[in-house]
């Protein structure tokens, strides 16, 4: 039989809101509510269907990259969508439901869940679709693009602070979750002169909305940021030097001059607590209690937060502390809730 050289999906890239991003995997699920209704009809057969509206969920797992590819990686996608939901005037479909940043010795990635309305839009609408698969080659990943080629971010690209637990963090995670609400309204249906269904102009950059169809409006009513991590429990202080400190953390954390001691990763002595206990009449917080940072060697040669610059997690409370004692490594797990500023 003859060979056919048509491309069948091997060479593909993903576009979200008109921008192309690097992804490890992606899933798009569109569903419509359908259930059978049984009435008094002299038969057990389901002859009437109750058909509701549509829902669209997009799940993307993407790496965090270093170099020119950082402009199109999972962190860039997540931060773009977080920034959008903080300002309703800039939000475009799909909207963010959650973004989970994970950092471990094996590397780092972002898991993103987006929601859209499933509306195919007007056939004449040229605005970007919320989610597309294209054959565009991602120029940012070419070795000669920009100042640096791209590689996957690894453990030496990150640093983590969990409260006053500043050393030997095994893994850390930040979750940004938005509360999204789906609502259906009675949208008037009409046709233009040739019988084509009319469309309603949506928000700026979102294209048009098919009038009279079963697509929901999406609302964002809240945002929550939580963090968790696993730290190694060291039983003695590891002294540093005035030049380098404990594994290069001297300058960042103030060094020995302020009593930095990585052996104090949990409090078991009388009067100490791992949690951020509240006092009467006060809201007690831990200053800069959860910091996940990546080194930016492309622009300013400085450490910067994995989250957008508009997000400040400097005020948090430690809500969980699980300490495990065994013959192996001593570890303690922490959960944080952050005030969003």
Image: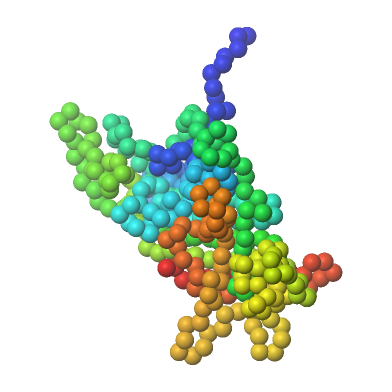
Q: Quadrant of residue 264?
A: bottom right
> Can see residue 255?
yes
Instruction: Residue lying at the far right in this picture: please name it.
Output: 327
Quarter containing the N terminus? top right
Picture coordinates of residue 177, whole percent (x, y):
48, 60
The answer to whether residue 167 shows anywhere in this view is: no
In this picture, residue 214 sits left or right of residue 317: left
**Going by the picture, which residue comes out furthest to the front?**
243
Q: Position of residue 329 (x, y in %)?
A: 79, 67
Quadrant location of the C terminus in the rendered image: bottom left
Q: Residue at x 63, y 53 (%)?
A: 157
Query: Which residue is drawn at the image coordinates 25% and 51% (left, top)?
Result: 186
Q: Residue furthest left?
A: 193
Q: Give the residue at the far top of this rendering.
A: 1
Query: Which residue appears at 38% of the width and 50% of the height?
Result: 39
Q: How is the structure coloured here?
A: rainbow
Instruction: Please say if 212 is above or below 258.
Output: above
Count of residue discs: 0
Residue 3 sits in quarter: top right
Residue 202, percent across and down? 27, 46
In this rendering, would 301 be left or right of 129?
right
Above or below 126: residue 4: above
Vertical position of residue 84 compared to residue 70: above or below:
below
Q: Pick the residue in front: 311 or 34.
A: 311
In percent of width and height, residue 82 lies at 43, 55
Q: Nearer the viewer, residue 218 or 158?
A: 158
The residue positioned 29% from the left and 34% from the top of the image is: 125
For residue 9, what is the image quadrant?
top right
């Amino acid at each position: 039989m003859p060979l056919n050289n048509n491309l069948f999906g091997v060479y593909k890239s993903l576009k979200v809101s008109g921008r192309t991003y690097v992804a490890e995997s992606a899933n798009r699920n569109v569903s419509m509510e359908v259930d059978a209704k049984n009435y008094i009809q002299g038969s057990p057969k389901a002859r009437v269907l109750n058909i509701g509206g549509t829902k669209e969920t997009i799940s993307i797992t993407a790496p965090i990259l270093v170099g020119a590819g950082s402009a199109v990686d999972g962190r860039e996608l997540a931060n773009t969508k977080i920034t959008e939901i903080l300002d309703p005037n800039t939000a475009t479909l799909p909207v963010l439901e959650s973004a989970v940043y994970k950092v471990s010795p094996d590397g780092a990635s972002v898991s993103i869940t987006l929601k859209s309305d499933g509306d195919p839009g007007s056939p004449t609408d040229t605005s970007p679709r919320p989610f597309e698969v294209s054959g565009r080659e991602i120029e940012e990943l070419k070795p000669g693009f920009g100042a640096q080629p791209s590689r996957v971010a690894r453990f030496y690209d990150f640093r983590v602070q969990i409260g006053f637990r500043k050393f030997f963090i095994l893994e850390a995670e930040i979750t940004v979750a938005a509360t999204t609400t789906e609502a259906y309204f009675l949208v008037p249906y009409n046709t233009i002169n040739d019988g084509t269904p009319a469309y309603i102009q949506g928000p700026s950059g979102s294209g048009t909305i098919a009038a009279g169809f079963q697509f929901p409006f999406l609302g964002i009513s809240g945002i929550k940021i939580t963090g968790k991590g696993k730290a190694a429990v060291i039983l003695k202080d590891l002294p540093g030097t005035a030049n380098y400190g404990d594994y290069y953390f001297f300058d960042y954390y103030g060094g020995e001059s302020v009593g930095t001691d990585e052996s104090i990763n949990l409090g078991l002595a009388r009067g100490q607590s791992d949690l951020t206990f509240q006092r009467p009449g006060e809201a007690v917080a831990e200053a800069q209690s959860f910091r996940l940072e990546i080194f930016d060697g492309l622009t300013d040669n400085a450490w910067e937060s994995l989250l957008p610059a508009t997000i400040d997690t400097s005020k948090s409370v430690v809500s969980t502390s699980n300490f495990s004692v065994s013959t192996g490594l001593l570890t303690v797990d922490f959960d944080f809730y952050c005030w969003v500023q």
